[in-house]
Image (tube, rainbow, N blue to C red):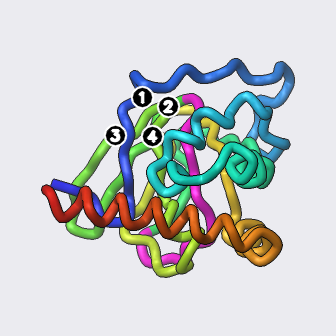
Amino acid sequence: MRLPMVALMPAAYVDLPRFKEGAHKEGTTPLHPGWLPVLARVPLFASLSKRHLRHVAGLAELQRYQYGAQIVRAGAHGNAFFVILDGSAEVVTPTGHRHALQAGDYFGELALLDGAPRAATVKASSDLATAKISRTAFQRLLKEEPAIGVGLARGLVAIIRDLQEE
């Protein structure tokens, strides 16, 4: 079963760089540029040039959550996209379907485009580190670099085609 608005990627394909020492509480710090390859594996961003992908990666911040923290809530306004860098989380849909997420998995990418209500709740099932891109910053980038929108359109088309083949 495919979860609505939650895309999953096998973590086995991701080689994640190590975190900087010292940042281990909940909060936000700038994301290390070594995370660029992780973002490049997200289907929405797959058609972006390396230059444009660097611009998107430049928006990302390292966001940490403690075990049990709610990251997003079903029905809430979608205001950010997340890639799990370390730890694990659980997706719970309003119908009760559950799915585990781990390093390399991501969720909320459509929130960057439409800000629609979240389709599921995501909670940290361990201490968790994510790369977080806010919708506000992303929308500002699209205005500054409209060519990124063309790349995103290609990525969305690829996602739709994959869904049609299932």
Q: Which residues are magenta?
A: 74-86
* Residue designated by label 4: 105
Counting residues from the start of the chain, the first of labels 1 and 2 encountered is 1
Q: Are marks 1 and 4 in contact (CB under 8 Å)?
A: yes
The residue nearer to you, when weighing 166 against 145, is: 145
User: Left or right: 96 with respect to 117?
Assistant: left
Amino acid under disc 3: Ala
* Residue designated by label 2: 103
Q: Is residue 150 above or below residue 129?
A: below
Quadrant holding the N terminus: bottom left
* Residue designated by label 1: 11
* Residue designated by label 3: 100
Q: Are marks 1 and 2 in contact (CB under 8 Å)?
A: yes
Q: Is any atom of residue 2 visible in this view? A: yes
Q: Residues within 10 Å of mark 2 (few under 14, many from 20)?
A: many
Residue at image coords 44%, 78%: 75
Q: Residues within 10 Å of mark 1 (few under 14, many from 20)?
A: some
Residue at image coords 65%, 49%: 49
**Distance of label 1 from label 3 (alpha carbons):** 12 Å
Quadrant holding the C terminus: bottom left
Residue at image coords 15%, 58%: 165
Q: Is any atom of residue 60 visible in this view? A: no
Q: Residues within 10 Å of mark 3 (few under 14, many from 20)?
A: some
Counting residues from the start of the chain, the first of labels 1 and 3 encountered is 1
- Whether residue 37 is in magenta: the answer is no
1 or 3: mark nearer the eye: 1
Q: Are marks 4 and 2 in contact (CB under 8 Å)?
A: yes
The residue nearer to you, when weighing 125 against 161, is: 161
Q: Secondary structure at mark 2?
A: loop
